[in-house]
Image (tube, rainbow, N blue to C red):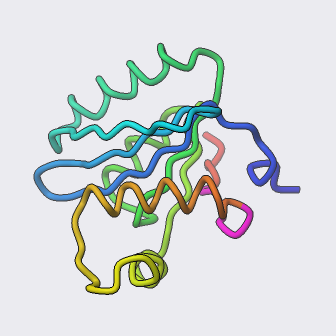
């Protein structure tokens, strides 16, 4: 049974990755206000952010929606046991964006926001990446 469908997460996060920076849209559970954050695209910046995330939500899990299912960002985040990754098909995000933005305009901040919304509102339709046993 896939328990990620019913897991209570401390936060839902949309991560829009790019070559130079990552945009994150973070919504702590039970809070109406979300936060936007931009990280440099370096392993150090990513790992420092994850350390802050672990400190902010101790002994709790967080859900991250990301528009890919493989690559260095996925590999780095899969190393953390409190992070549950939900890959989103790029076409699914494009169609979701089109439903709310008639012009089809794309920007990283908006995509991060939409990814977070997808994981928060439609997690039951998404599948978490499974960790392979070591």
- Please determine whether, in this image, residue 15 is positioned above or below residue 134: below
Q: Is 44 on the left-hand or right-hand side of 48?
A: left
Q: Could you tell me residue 27's position as x and y percent?
A: 50, 39
Q: Nearer the viewer, residue 131 or 37?
A: 37
Q: Residue at 52%, 57% (x, y): give it.
A: 117
Q: Quadrant of residue 81?
A: top right
Q: Quadrant of the C terminus?
A: top right
Asked if the stretch drawn in magenta spans residue 127, the answer is yes
Question: Magenta: predominant secondary structure element?
Answer: loop
Residue located farthest toward the left when viewing the structure as drawn: 20
Residue 132, horizontal then vertical, whole percent: 62, 49
Residue 126 lies left or right of residue 89; in this view the side is right
Compared with residue 49, is residue 101 higher up or lower down, i.e. above or below? below
| Quadrant housing residue 41 | top left
Q: Residue at x 58, y 15 (%)?
A: 58
Name which residue lies at 54% across and 50% down.
85
Residue drawn at point x = 37 percent, y = 36 percent: 35
Where is residue 78? Give x, y as percent. Answer: 49, 43
From the viewer's side, name the closer residue of 126 and 1: 126
Query: Which of the pair 75/3 is nearer the observer?
Result: 3
The count of marks equals 0
x, y percentage for residue 69? 46, 65
Q: Is residue 97 shown left or right of residue 7?
A: left
Magenta stretch: residue 17 in it? Answer: no
Placement of the N terminus among the 4 image quadrants = bottom right
Magenta residues (range): 124-129
């Amino acid at each position: 049974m896939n328990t990620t469908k019913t897991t209570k997460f401390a936060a839902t996060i949309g991560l829009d990755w790019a070559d130079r920076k990552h945009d994150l849209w973070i919504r702590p559970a039970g809070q109406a206000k979300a936060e936007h954050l931009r990280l440099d695209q370096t392993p150090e910046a990513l790992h420092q952010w994850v350390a802050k995330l672990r400190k902010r939500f101790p002994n709790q899990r967080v859900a991250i929606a990301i528009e890919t299912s493989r690559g260095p960002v996925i590999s780095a985040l899969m190393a953390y046991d409190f992070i549950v990754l939900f890959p989103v098909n790029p076409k699914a995000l494009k169609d979701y964006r089109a439903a709310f933005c008639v012009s089809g305009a794309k920007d990283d901040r908006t995509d991060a926001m939409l990814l977070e919304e997808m994981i928060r509102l439609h997690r039951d339709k998404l599948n978490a990446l499974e960790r392979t046993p070591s």
